Amino acid sequence: MPSEGILQQSPVSAIGLTPAKDFTVRGTTVRIHLAGVLDRSKLQDLMIRADGALLGRNRLVILDGSRLQHLDYRCVPTLVRWSRSLKTYGHRLHLAGWNQYLSAILAMEDWDDELQQGSRKVGKMPALGSPQYIQAP
């Protein structure tokens, strides 16, 4: 697996922290602080732990990527599926603090833009207009 060969620059990981440090619950908002490299196995563990913090309905789940260094592109479809499943319980998934590098990874894999980053969306390609035909000599 390619993700096994990725060297983590920081000893902090999304799952390696204690729940008190990487999960912040205030009212109906659950903020999950991501750090280091997020790969598929860490994302699965994170989703299992997050489900335990999502008691009730209509919660705002914020994935804080301000300390995230790398996102395995293969995690994006799982994030989209998780976002859809959260919506069935009235929860909303919001991405905050994701830098341009991480946003580019999301944009390449989340074609329908389901993982919106708040009011700022990942850039779209401009309209190219009608095709121009040229005559070859």
Image (cartoon, rainbow, N blue to C red):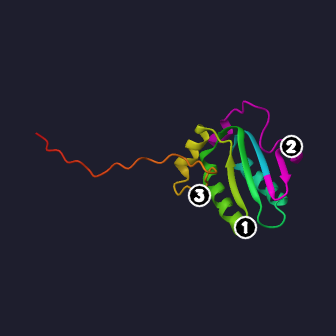
Percent x, y of residue 109: 55, 50
Circle nearer the N terminus (1, 3): 1
Residue placed at 79% from the left, 36% from the top? 12
Circle nearer the N terminus (2, 3): 2
Quarter of the image with the C terminus in it: top left
- Residue 118 is left or right of residue 28, and the answer is left
In front of the other: 102 or 10: 102
Circle nearer the N terminus (1, 2): 2
Residue 29: assigned label? none
As measured in the structure, the alpha-carbon distance from the residue carrying label 2 to the one carrying label 3 is 28 Å
Percent x, y of residue 92: 70, 60
Disc 2 residue type? Lys
Give the magenta-colored segment's residue range. Answer: 1-30
According to the picture, the residue beneath numbered tag 2 turns out to be: 21
Residue 90: assigned label? 1
Disc 3 residue type? Glu
How many numbered dots are placed on residues in this image?
A: 3
Q: Is mark 1 on a helix, strand or loop?
A: loop
Residue placed at 85% from the left, 57% from the top? 27
According to the picture, the residue beneath numbered tag 3 turns out to be: 114
Labelled pair 1, 3 in contact (Cβ < 8 Å): no
Disc 1 residue type? Gly
